[in-house]
Each structure stands twice: as structure tokens, then as C-alpha cells.
Image (cartoon, rainbow, N blue to C red):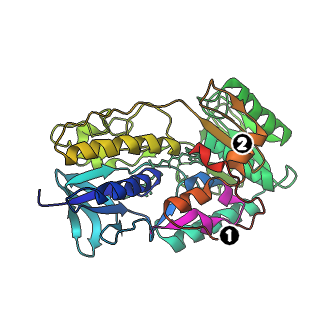
Amino acid sequence: MTNLNIVIVGGGFAGVRMATALESTIEKTKEKYTIILVEKKSHFYHSIAGPRSTVDEIEERLLVPYTNLFKNKRNQVIQASAIRFEEHKLYLDKDVKNYGTSIDFAYLIIASGTDYAAPSKMPVVNYEDCLSYIRTARKQITNAESILIIGGGPVGVELVGEIRDKFSPKQKKITLVHSGGSVGGHIMPQKSKNKVLSLFKESQVNLILNDRVILPESAPLSTAFIPDEPIKTEKGETINADLVLIAYGSKPQSGWVKSSFPDTVSKEGYIDVKPTLQINKAGLEHVLVLGDVADLKETKMAYRTEPHVAVAIQTIKSLFEGKKPTKEYKSGPNMMVVTYGKYHGTGMLPIFNITVGDRVTSLVKGKTLFIDKSWASLNLTPPSSNSNDGKDEDEDEFY
Ligand SMILES: Cc1cc2nc3c(=O)[nH]c(=O)nc-3n(C[C@H](O)[C@H](O)[C@H](O)COP(=O)(O)OP(=O)(O)OC[C@H]3O[C@@H](n4cnc5c(N)ncnc54)[C@H](O)[C@@H]3O)c2cc1C
């Protein structure tokens, strides 16, 4: 094999974790592999804390530079978008130093994740643009008197909770419209769903279930927007909102894979993988898929990237040795913690579906939102927080 590049596409939770694990793995191989992480954004975006950025000035803590990701200078992060690939070549959307518009690879790791409306994901790619996007969104929320949130899954609930944590019902009216009959996400036990309902009631959130908003044709689906006129629902409700936030519609970032090998991508956009996390396509045994974009029938969660990477490393080690990979991925139990601001929320633990309430939710996630953990995964320390909450010792257990 002449080409020793291992290319990772996507520097989110899965790509970063894989990059670090791979770097220590290749230190022990006799071939001198080079890892190249291709990421369209200039900085890692800690999406888990996106909803809090709508009310707190934490944007500089949410954007983590990739500068310290690799210990060995041979490995590098390139800011570009992958647009398609062939058996051993990845094409980029721009010219990059030392490579041009394509990179040859021996192995390709696909970790391009999913897209979602801001502030859960960023619609812009460069640091200053992200900062200014978040600041503008926060100003819009501060100025709005009546906010409509569409979507009552975990992200919708967390958004409501953050806004309510900061602004009382007198300061802001919040309406949440959800097409389903209960809020909090489909895997949530009933007890947790009831807890969310009681939090909504206590904090005077106007909840409309089993109905859908009729979005104006001009409405952007990836960002907050200020509607020109009152918003209507399919069942005839009229909502006078001066700001609308979208909290539904996760989109797998697999268009570039589909344009390369269309039959590897499901109609929902997820990439077909074997249990060894190799892409399910003859001739592409050297291409692996992990993280949210993989078509694994499980919840899409950052904590799952740890077992994904454990299997992917075993698979790639077998491939290095010319052996058939045998380690198979099996989804672990569900676990989810949904915050409602810093001090409230609910969740379920992986054992016997035990539900947790305000205290545990706040302790494991609500106060710190795992921000320090993401900085640590990129071998950095975050800028200090303005909050007095500090880091709890057991905050790292949930992703
Ligand atoms: C509000 C919120 C709260 C959450 N809370 C939790 C939680 O408490 N615990 C938990 O475990 N999970 C949580 N999650 C889920 C978690 O964020 C996702 O599971 C996680 O982001 C998946 O990681 P990933 O690396 O697969 O994908 P992503 O994080 O989506 O990363 C993919 C990366 O690939 C890049 N990319 C995409 N396409 C290309 C391309 N063509 N070229 C180059 N780069 C590309 C993107 O820019 C991105 O950086 C939460 C999510 C949200 C939105």
C-alpha cells in the first residue's frame, strides 16, 4: 500500500473521539499512517449547550479550536467540506494547502453527523460568524415578548427550559406546538413526560399538542425567524408570536455520500453499515461509518460514539493486519437526560429505566452541559465560565 492517509470526515463528537483513539492506535503500527480530519467548520461546536446560548453569554465556551486535537504534527485538521468520494479519493469543496481539491486515502471514516436548526447546530462555519450568529439570536430572544417553539422533543423542551430559566411568564409568553401527544421524546418513560408537563404548567408555558404549525412559505427551516403575521395551526389555533424557533427535523449529513454511492444511503439519509461499522458496500471495506449518520437503529446520542469508536478501532486494526474484522457493534441501553434550565429536568438511566428528577439532572447535565468535557476531548481547557456553578465531579457520566 503506497498511500497511508486515513481521512476522517466530520469533527463532531464521533470524529474527534475517533481521531484521538486512532492517533494512539497508529503510534503502535509499523506503517507511518497520517490522519487527516476534514471538517467544514473552523471550530468544534458543542451543540449540547446550544439552547443555553440563547440566554447566556457562553458562545466562546461552545466553540472549541481544533489546534490541539493531534499530538503528532504529522496528523492534521483541514477546514473544508467533503463533496464526494471514490474508492480511494475524497473530493473537497475548495483548494487546501498540500492537497489541492482532493485527498487520496487508504482508509476513510465517515462521521458527518446530522444537521438541525440553530442554535442546536450552526448554520455558519467560521468562528466569528458563529459568535455573531449566536449573539444576534440571543438579542432576538431578549427582545421578543412572545416566542413560539415548534417541536416538543428533547431539544424543544430544553429550549423552553432555558428561556424560562431566564425570563418569567410576565416577561415572555412561550408557546410550544408539538405534532405528537406528549413531550420529551419517544423513549422517555411516562413518569418523565409527566414531569415535563408539570414543569410547563408551573412555568406557564402554553402547550399545544397533536397539532401542526402551518409555516409561512418564506420561513427558513434552519434558523429562528420573525414572522410577518400571526402563525396558524392546522387545527385552527392562531399564535401571535414575534419570534419562531424550530426544534424538529434532524437531517443526516450524507448528501456527499449519496452522490458517490447512492445505494449506501437510506431514504431517510442514514448510511448503511455492517455490524463491524464498515459501510455496507462491496469494494468499500476500508470505509467506516460512525456517529449519528450511521444507520443504526438506536437513539442518536453523543454517548454512543464511545462504543462506536471502540468497534471502529478494532475493525481498522484488523484491516491493518489484513484480517477480516470480527468485532461487532451492539447498541447499548437507552439513556437520556433532558434539562429544563440549570436546575430542573428529568431523564432515564440505563438501568431498569429508572427516572431521575431535578437534582440528578442538574448535577449530571444541567449546570455544566458537559462543556469542559468537549474541551478536554480536544486537549484544551475552556475559558472560564461566568457562572458560579463550577464543575461537578460526576458530570462526565452521561456522554
Ligand atoms: C440540544 C441538544 C442536546 C443534546 N444532549 C445530549 C446529551 O445530553 N447526551 C448525548 O449523548 N447526546 C446529546 N445530544 C446529541 C448529540 O449532540 C449528538 O448525538 C452528537 O452531536 C452526534 O455526534 P456526531 O459526531 O455523530 O455528529 P455531529 O455532532 O453532527 O458532527 C458532525 C460533524 O461533521 C461535520 N460535517 C458534516 N458534513 C460534512 C462534510 N461534508 N464535510 C466536512 N465536515 C462535515 C459537521 O460540521 C459536524 O462538525 C444532544 C443534541 C442536542 C442538539
Residue drawn at 56 percent across, 42 percent down: 248
Identify the residue at image location x=72%, y=42%: 361
SS at mark 2 in the image: helix
Residue 8 percent location from the top left of the image: 32, 56
Give the image quarter of residue 191. Answer: top right
> Is 61 inside the magenta-drawn segment?
yes
Vertical side of 241 occupied by 204: above or below: above
Q: Is residue 348 magenta?
A: no
Quarter that holds the N terminus:
bottom left
Under mark 1, the amino acid is Ser
Residue extent of the magenta highlight = 52-66
Task: Classify residue 342 as left or right of residue 150.
Answer: right
SS for callout 1: loop
Name the residue at the left extreme: 1
Circles 1 and 2: CB distance less than 8 Å?
no
Task: Determine whether the beta carbon of the residue marked 1 sits less than 8 angstroms from the nearest atom of ligand 1.
Answer: no
* Residue in front for this viewpoint, 243 or 218: 243
Mark 1: few/some/many CA within 10 Å (<14, 14-19, 20+): few
- Residue 231 drawn at (x, y percent): 67, 45
Q: Residue at x 30, y 61 (%)?
A: 35
Q: Is residue 242 left or right of residue 96?
A: right
Q: Which mark is residue 384?
A: 1
In percent of width and height, residue 268 lies at 39, 36
Q: Is residue 354 left or right of residue 167?
A: left
Image spot of residue 182 (x, y percent):
67, 28
Residue 399 visible to the viewer: yes
Residue 231 visible in the displayed image = no
Earlier-in-chain disc, 1 versus 2: 2
> Badge 2: how crowded within 10 Å, few (<14), some, or many (20+)?
many
Residue, far bottom: 97
Q: Which residue is mark 2?
A: 361
